[in-house]
């Protein structure tokens, strides 16, 4: 299988996120458990994706395509808005009356961001970088994906070197929080089963 370049890597990420959006939009109004599960996956995927773009793509774009600076600055602001919404969704319950509308606004913002990136920034990058450079970028993105934060951190720096430091500190904390949170939820479920007599 040929090596995947950085732009193809990001397009694949975009398709995966759009698929999650479609699944969320197809849920019923009271499908709270399904909405929570999908929202958590969306939060994780977008947090990782934003980290990859901020630490790998945008710094290279600013150097290789000087005219892309405005595009990159706008993209960073869009990321900030998205991470702020993700942080709010993470704290909300799917039964909250503003949960679904907030997710709808998130979806609209991310789709706009994807459309701009794919129609404006990516073509500039294809012209500016050699095939080999794009392959290396793809390898760097795959490596970064394994260590990026899995939760939104809207107040953390979004440009290197601060963003790299923030990622190194945040990612292990995010992983620990996810593990402990899952254990707490299982414990609550077990206790509830004992209390109601079901034993499940």
Image: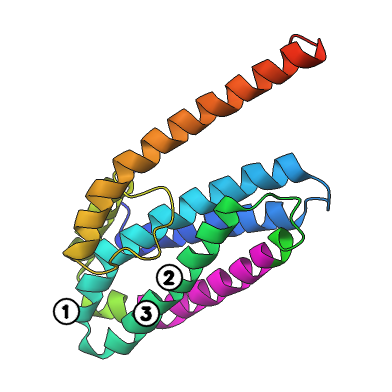
Residue 117 spot, x, y in % from top left? 43, 76
Q: Mark 1 highlights which residue? A: 63
Residue name at image x 67 percent, y 17 percent: 191
* Whether residue 155 is situated above or below residue 140 in the rendered picture: below
Q: Residue 17 or 195: which is nearer the viewer?
A: 195
Q: Mark 3 highlights which residue? A: 121
Answer few, some or many: residues within 10 Å of disc 1's Cα (few below 14, many 20 plus, some between 14 and 19): few
| Occupied quadrant, residue 71 | bottom left
> What span is in magenta?
102-122
- Looking at this rendering, what residue extends furthest in the front direction? 195
Q: Mark 2 highlights which residue? A: 79
Whether residue 4 can be seen here: yes
Prevalent SS, magenta region: helix
Whether residue 146 can be seen here: no
* Viewport quadrant of the C terminus: top right
Residue name at image x 39 percent, y 62 percent: 50
């Amino acid at each position: 299988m040929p090596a995947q370049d950085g732009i193809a890597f990001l397009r694949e990420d975009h398709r995966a996120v759009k698929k999650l959006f479609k699944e969320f939009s197809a849920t019923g109004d009271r499908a709270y458990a399904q909405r929570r599960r999908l929202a958590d996956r969306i939060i994780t995927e977008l947090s990782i994706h934003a980290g990859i773009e901020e630490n790998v793509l945008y710094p290279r774009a600013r150097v290789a395509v000087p005219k892309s600076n405005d595009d990159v600055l706008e993209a960073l602001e869009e990321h900030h808005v998205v991470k702020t919404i993700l942080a709010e969704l993470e704290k909300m319950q799917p039964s909250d009356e503003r949960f679904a509308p907030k997710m709808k606004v998130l979806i609209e913002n991310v789709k706009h961001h994807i459309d701009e990136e794919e129609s404006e920034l990516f073509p500039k990058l294809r012209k500016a970088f050699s095939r080999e450079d794009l392959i290396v970028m793809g390898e760097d993105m795959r490596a970064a994906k394994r260590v990026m934060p899995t939760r939104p951190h809207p107040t953390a720096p979004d440009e290197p070197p601060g963003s790299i430091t923030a990622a190194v500190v945040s990612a292990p904390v995010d992983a620990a929080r996810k593990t402990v949170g899952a254990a707490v939820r299982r414990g609550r479920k077990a206790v509830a089963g004992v209390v109601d007599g079901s034993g499940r």
